[in-house]
Amino acid sequence: MSSRTLWGFSSILIIVVLVGTIYSRHGFFDLRRIQRQIKNTRDQAAQVEMENQKLKRQVGLFEKPSNDLIEREVRDVLGWVKSNEIVYLEKSK
């Protein structure tokens, strides 16, 4: 083999390896796609964790409710009023 043929063969081999590394199933573009998926999944997990913490705080309020919380729920949900309060009703339009 002449040096020119060897150089041409080596160049083609290097090009094939580089193209394969970039475009193959486990290549550079696939790696970038997977990294984006990991980031998106972590972001979603963080949002779910924040929502989970919020719900835990709300559950904690109902596990040991204060008198103010109980009174507010009874008034809002059941419409109860104290005996010395006057209720004003608006006419619906």
Image: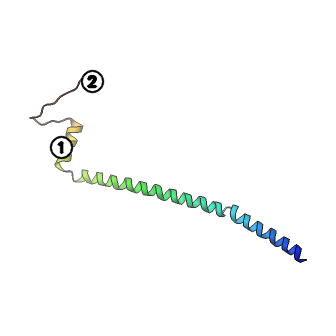
Where 75 falls versus 90 (above or below)?
below
Q: Quadrant of residue 31?
A: bottom right
At which x and y percent is residue 55? 33, 52
Q: Secondary structure at mark 2?
A: loop
Tell me the amino acid under the disc marked 1: Glu
3D distance between C-alphas at marks 1 and 2: 26 Å
Q: Which mark is residue 71?
A: 1
Colour basis: rainbow
For the N terminus, which image quadrant?
Answer: bottom right
Write the residue at 21% across / 53% down: 64
Mark 1, other Cα within 10 Å: few <14 / some 14–19 / many ≥20: some
Write the residue at 16% across / 30% down: 87
Write the residue at 58% across / 60% down: 34
In the picture of the structure, the residue carrying the numbered disc 2 is 92
Left or right, residue 86 beside residue 26: left
For the C terminus, which image quadrant?
Answer: top left
Tell me the amino acid under the disc marked 2: Ser
Choose the circle earlier in sequence order: 1 or 2: 1
